[in-house]
Amino acid sequence: MTGEVKRAIFLDRDGTLIEEVNFLHRVEDLRFFPFTEEAVSILKNAGFLLIVVTNQSGVGRGMFSADIVVQIHEAIQRRLDEKIDRFYFCTHLPEEGCECRKPNVGMIEQAKEDFSIDLENSWIIGDKRLDMELGFNAGINTCLVLTGYGNVEVHKLKRKPDLIAENLLEAARKIIWWNS
Ligand SMILES: [Mg+2]
Ligand SMILES: [Zn+2]
């Protein structure tokens, strides 16, 4: 018997789910947006898998350990009542040319395998052009948020995303509307 195929929201972490902190490496520096919990609840209640995909090259640069990244993800989970289904992170440097660093699709391919995801009806929400390019490369829907680097990155886009939203909460509402 084959399992149920599910839609997913792929969430960028820094600047999208939580506030942008350059090379966040201490749990104490973790800052949620005032709307993060509500947005996550809306998407979860709509039946989406919630999957975080984040580039953490600070690990590859030797600035902090992968353990710290895991601790930060555990702290996010506590705050969000364990609503995130999985965190995937790439620790490599851009010049390593790995398959997992966004905008390469390795993390999405891995998630697809782990959860049997319906990519065509899934979304990436992120604040950078590379998040949108990840979406284009993976064949999923794209939503740019204007938090984090979004206000700057919006001008760097070569191809328009499906949606642009002020922040994660507006993104959640627009995606629910889009799918209704
Ligand atoms: Mg980001
Ligand atoms: Zn990688």
Image (cartoon, rainbow, N blue to C red):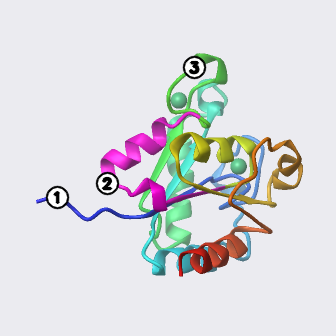
- Residue 80 on image: x %, y %: 53, 71
Relative to residue 52, is residue 29 drawn left or right?
right
Q: Amino acid at mark 3?
A: Gly
Separation of residues labelled 2 and 3 (CA atoms): 26 Å
The quadrant of the picture occupied by the N terminus is: bottom left
- Mark 1, residue position: 2
Nearest to the observer: residue 165 or residue 107: 165
Earlier sequence position, callout 1 versus callout 2:
1
* Closer mark to the observer between disc 2 and disc 3: 2
Query: In this rendering, does residue 25 appear at all?
Result: no
Q: Amino acid at mark 1?
A: Thr
Q: Amino acid at mark 2?
A: Ser
Residue linked to disc 2? 116
- Identify which residue is drawn at 47% across, 51% down: 87
Q: In the shown orientation, is residue 44 left or right of residue 148?
A: left
Name the one closer to the observer, 73 or 132.
Answer: 132
Task: Tell whether position 39 is magenta.
Answer: no
Q: In the rendered picture of this protein, how many numbered marks are placed on residues?
A: 3
Q: Which residues are magenta?
A: 104-125
* Residue 7, position as x, y percentages in the image: 42, 64
- Local secondary structure at mark 2: loop
Q: Tell me the element at label 1.
A: loop
The reply to whether discs 1 and 2 touch (Cβ–Cβ < 8 Å) is yes
Residue that numbered label 3 is attached to = 97
Q: Are marks 2 and 3 in contact (CB under 8 Å)?
A: no
Residue drawn 44% across the image and 54% down it: 119
